Amino acid sequence: MRKLTSPFVSFWISVAGTALWVVPAAQAATTTTTFPVTATVLKACFVSATALSFGNYDPTATVPLDSTATLTVLCTVGTSFTVGLNAGTVSGGTVTTRRMTSGANTLGYGLFQDTGRATNWGSTPGTDTPAAITAPIAASSLTVFGRVVAGQNVPTNTYTDTITVTVNY
């Protein structure tokens, strides 16, 4: 059998093999970009309240009956807000002379901003509501101080009213 490779062919095969070994591999390329990430934080508030329960009222007592409720307000940090309390649901009640009812009978009471129960808590910001609060990181707790005045001779029963809390922000 005859050999098909000549020195010339062997030379070029050898050069080609060396060239493949010497040529660097293709470099990987990269490219980059950026994209924006955004969110818009809105002003928002949430409010909850505990019940204001006066318990048992003695119409013959000479001292008023006091109790408290707690309002918890959580607003977006830095949001300025005020909290108002309406007149209640009983006909004839106002923010200064609220009334609980049992049938046709009413029992007067008041809601106040202070422990001495001297500053009425109404529903008009800047007039009869606590000063505006700037929301901190945590929820704000506000105490509502309630008082049933002494000497109201009313029939025995359970008297009720419902107050609406409004957060203005």
Image (cartoon, grey):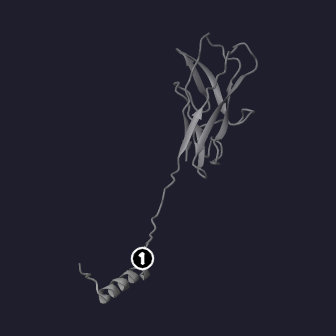
The residue located at (60%, 40%) in the rendering is 73
Above or below, 75 against 53 in this view is below
Q: Position of residue 46 (x, y in %)?
A: 55, 40
Above or below, 108 against 79 in this view is above
Q: Nearer the viewer, residue 91 or 16?
A: 16
Say which element carries label 1.
loop
Give the position of the N terminus as an image quadrant. Answer: bottom left
The residue located at (74%, 15%) in the rendering is 61
Q: Nearer the viewer, residue 150 or 56?
A: 56
Q: Quadrant of residue 27?
A: bottom left
Q: Nearer the viewer, residue 12 or 90?
A: 12
Q: Give left or right: position of 38 versus 64.
A: left
Q: Quadrant of residue 70?
A: top right
Q: Position of residue 7 (x, y in %)?
A: 32, 88
Q: How many marks?
A: 1
Above or below, 114 against 24 in this view is above
Q: Give left or right: position of 139 versus 31.
A: right
The residue located at (60%, 27%) in the rendering is 98
Q: Position of residue 129 (x, y in %)?
A: 63, 41
Three-letter code, disc 1: Ala
Residue beneath disc 1: 25
Direction left: furthest residue: 1
Above or below, 66 against 104 in this view is below
Q: Position of residue 123 (x, y in %)?
A: 57, 39
Direction top: furthest residue: 156
At label 1, counting other C-alpha atoms closer than 10 Å, the crowd grade (few under 14, some 14-19, many 20 or more) is few
Direction bottom: furthest residue: 8
